[in-house]
Amino acid sequence: MQVKKLPIMAKTDLVRNISYLDALGIQAWVRRDVSSERSAAPETEPAAPVLEQTPAVVTKPSLMPWEQLQTQIASCAQCELAAGRTQSVFGIGDAQADLMIIGEAPGRDEDMKGEPFVGRAGLLLNAMLHAIGLEREQIFIANVLKCRPPQNRDPSLAEIEACSNYLKAQIEHIQPKMLLVVGRIAAHFLLETNVAVGKLRLQVHHYQGIPLIVTYHPAYLLRRPSEKRKSWDDLKLALATMQAQT
Ligand code: URA
């Protein structure tokens, strides 16, 4: 597979992109002596039921042709979420991307539009990508779940299990150089752990040999804007790790 190279961002571009961070309310650099408010913020996303066990992989993901995968996901009825969806949400972007972002599950806006991260959290994600010199079209964005859980509740273990082979097949197909995983559900699923996001971030993990970085979910950052700077650090690590491979 021919791998498309992402642009290497010059330092001047990085500095210019900090203006996007400013627009987001993210302070790229802060003096340590005025950061006490931020350091008082909790390190992790709010406590919520975590996966008791890493969900078992039902079968090894098969590398079916991309179009067939799309068709299967569009008509999937492997769990009860199919009954409540407007449509399934396959994912979007470049199927040969170097960077793949993985979220949790479609919300109301995504269910309506059939595209991941198009609501408020999606706008923030776009701005964060822009800050490291990337646009949505250059990467691939997908979720663990392809259908919206009602009332945006956490996905159940059974739903994750039913859907897991789709995401695995997508990763196997795209073979990205970097997985950027946003939020607890996706991080716990791919890393087979229950460790809090705050403790998983700022490290280079691996999934099937692919470097994987965990950061906060944009929806969490909307609720806790003081944590945005940490995500900025995670994005910079993801970019540097990816560039180090080229
Ligand atoms: N949150 C997610 O995890 N994924 C989406 O597509 C939208 C919101």
Image (cartoon, helix red, strand yellow):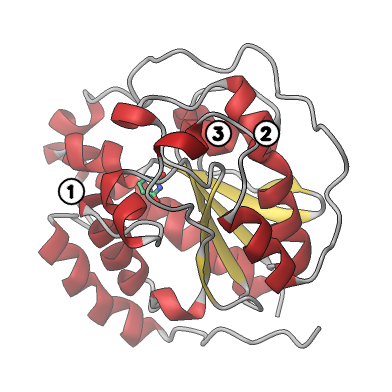
Q: Type of residue at label 1?
A: Arg
Mark 1 or mark 3: name the one nearer the start of the chain. Answer: 1
Left/right of residue 51 with respect to residue 224 in the rendered view? right
Numbered badge on residue 136: none
SS at circle 2: helix
Residue located beneath label 1 in the image: 31
SS at circle 3: helix
| Contact, mark 2 vs mark 1 (Cβ under 8 Å) | no
> Distance from label 2 to label 3 (Cα)?
25 Å
> Distance from label 2 to label 1 (Cα)?
47 Å
Q: Position of residue 104 (x, y in %)?
A: 47, 41
Task: Please determine whether, in this image, residue 59 is positioned above or below residue 179.
Answer: above
Inspect this view and state whether residue 237 appears.
yes
Q: Type of residue at label 3?
A: Leu
Residue 65 found in image quarter: bottom right
Q: How many marks?
A: 3
Which sits in the foreground, 66 or 123? 66
Which sits in the foreground, 200 or 166? 166
SS at circle 1: loop
Residue located beneath label 3 in the image: 200
Q: Position of residue 115 (x, y in %)?
A: 40, 62
Residue located beneath label 2 in the image: 162
